[in-house]
Image (cartoon, rainbow, N blue to C red):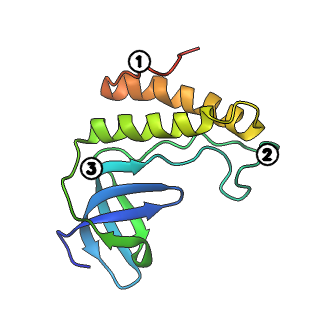
Amino acid sequence: MENGQIVRAFRKTGSYVGEITEAGQDVCIVRVLAVLKHPMQGNLHHPREVEVPFFHERKAHAFREQIQVPANMVRPYKGDIPKYEDSLKDAVQNLHDELAAKPDDPFSKRSLEALKVLIREYELMYGIQWPNIAKS
């Protein structure tokens, strides 16, 4: 990996396209350009559990935000880089659809509640609308 290289970076439960701004042996600093997979909601230490001390609303990293990623979680990226807002919209829609497909699962219900709060924030921040996602 080298500075300026376009990569796919995996951070916590999200996946991003970005540009390496600082390549180290153990860690890379990556400038986020697009979201490939929105982070899962909930507690990282207790995945898919609802009864936890704090159930996190996990936002996607912002456009051009610099994130620290372990070097072993960075891969070269080939292909077109989607516009950030379009990629965020697709990633949120995919996560929503995945969770909504399990309406009786307590984790999915709780995650959908958290995701709807984030959707309202994304609408304000980026002007994105999700016509296929109910706002209530």
Left or right of 50 on screen, residue 26: left
Q: Earlier in the sequence, mark 2 or mark 1?
A: 2
> Callout 2: helix, strand or loop?
loop
**In which quadrant of the rendered view does residue 42 lie?**
top right
Q: Amino acid at mark 1?
A: Pro
Residue 136 percent coordinates (x, y): 59, 14
Callout 1: few (<14), some (14-19), or many (20+) C-alpha neighbours within 10 Å? few
Q: CA distance from mark 3 to mark 1?
A: 26 Å
Please name the residue shown 36% across and 55% down the image: 16
Please name whichever residue, 12 or 24, is drawn nearer the observer in this view of the structure.
Answer: 12
Please name the residue shown 36% across and 85% down the image: 25
Residue 82 percent coordinates (x, y): 23, 46
Q: Quarter holding the N terminus? A: bottom left
Residue furthest to the front in view is: 101
Q: Which residue is mark 3?
A: 64
Please name the residue shown 61% across and 31% down the image: 100
Q: Which residue is mark 2?
A: 53
Q: Earlier in the sequence, mark 3 or mark 1?
A: 3
Q: Amino acid at mark 3?
A: Arg
**In which quadrant of the rendered view does residue 8 lie?**
bottom left
> Callout 3: helix, strand or loop?
loop
For discs 2 and 1, the disc positioned in front in the rendered view: 1
Left or right of 111 on screen, residue 59: left
> Callout 1: helix, strand or loop?
loop
Q: Which residue is mark 1?
A: 131
Q: Are marks 2 and 3 in contact (CB under 8 Å)?
A: no
Q: CA distance from mark 2 to mark 3?
A: 32 Å
